[in-house]
Amino acid sequence: MSVKIKSRKTIKNAIVQQIECYNGEGKIVRDEEYEEGIVVSVEIYRYENQYSLKERFNSEGILRRRDETWYNENNEIEKEDFGFATYYYQYGADKRLLSMKKFDSENNIENSIEYSYVEDYEYRKFFNSSGILISLSVTRYNDAKKPFRTIYFEIPHHDFIGAEESEGYMEFFEMMKIFGFDIDGNMVDTKISMYFLVEEIVFEYDQFGNTISEEMYHYDGESLEDKLAFRGGVYNYYNENNLLIKYHSLEIKTDWDDELCCLYEYVLDEKGLIIEKSTDSGFNKIIEKFNYNSKGKLISYVENRNNGEEVKEILYDDFGNKISEITELNFDGEYEKDIKEYEIEYY
């Protein structure tokens, strides 16, 4: 039986925290936030054809914020008005975003972003209020539409001596030539240099589509070798069950390196659900145990680590919605118990 929630009240340790109300389509229409059982804010939502409104009131019922959104026939956002700023969006025939323009409360343009797509490349150009290109990102995507290389450029905030194009960096100089034009395509006097290059990020994926490496490189203008220098990376290793078994991050800094390595081990039941997970980061080891009901929903959880334990029990109603969550914490000899209940009314 399919039912929809009409309202949900969240109660923690016998004190109301939140009350949410929904319409027959499952969209939220009212959200009340409480502190110590006293309402501190109320958000009201309204939906019309290709339009939505959210108003936020304080505890005294005074309007503090009004957000409006307009949609086109493809349900894409065309305009957003947040009171202090208004955003306009344009899309191409393929429904990809082409531009975003931001205006202040007096309808003066603050900045704009233009997007263009050439084969498997996406170009993102950020312009200031005068129409001068401030930053550029170029992302290339693989056949699975995942980014495997992103390059960031920014106009430097300091003076520099212009660099001549060199054989090793011709690709970057070709990309940076776009800084010689404003938003209307007029030429501007901008001297380009490798100092524009902020970062290059290279991604790699496994057969499941998981990101297994993300490496960052910066242009090293101080080096005599004049090169892109490795600045850090994140590496993930997965097993045949598509579970993360090792996480390794590395950041190379000026005077020290920041490095973290975590190892993960799992125990699975006959359905392939994780019933136990261990995490070892060298200085801390965590053991987590999970228990599920016949529908595969988590009903209890135990976490043990160096300095304590967390135990959680969860109850659901006949429709599969959470109605109770009891958490017991015992860390460094300090005990705490939280009881969270959900009172649900259905249509």
Image: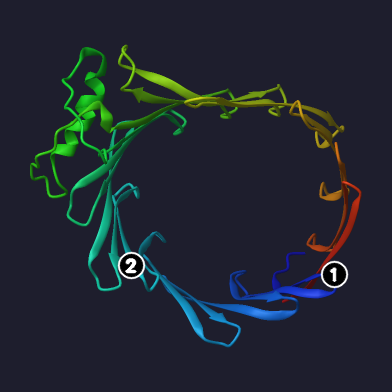
The part of the image, by quadrant, that contains residue 220 is top left
Mark 1 in CB contact with mark 2 (< 8 angstroms):
no
Q: How many marks?
A: 2
Compared with 110, 176 (above or below) is above
Compared with 301, 163 (above or below) is above
Q: Quadrant of the C terminus?
A: bottom right
Q: Amino acid at mark 1?
A: Asn
Asked if residue 26 lies left or right of residue 305, the reply is left
Residue, far front: 255
**CA distance separating discs 1 and 2:** 41 Å
- Helix, strand or loop at disc 1? loop
- Which of pointers 1 and 2 lies earlier in the amino acid sequence? 1
Choose between 225 and 54: the one closer to the eye.
Answer: 225
Compared with 331, 33 (above or below) is below
The part of the image, by quadrant, that contains residue 83 is bottom left
**Residue 221 placed where, x, y %?**
31, 22
Question: Which residue is at 9% across, 42% downward?
Answer: 188
Question: Which residue is at 91% across, 49% downward?
Answer: 333
Question: Which residue is at 86% across, 40% downward?
Answer: 307
Asked if residue 226 lies left or right of residue 144, the reply is left
**Residue 40 placed where, x, y %?**
64, 79
Q: Amino acid at mark 2?
A: Thr
Can residue 55 be seen? yes
- Helix, strand or loop at disc 2? strand
Choose between 59 and 225: the one closer to the eye.
Answer: 225
The part of the image, by quadrant, that contains residue 302 is top right
Q: Which residue is mark 2?
A: 86
Q: Nearer the viewer, mark 1 or mark 2?
A: 1
Q: Which residue is mark 1?
A: 13
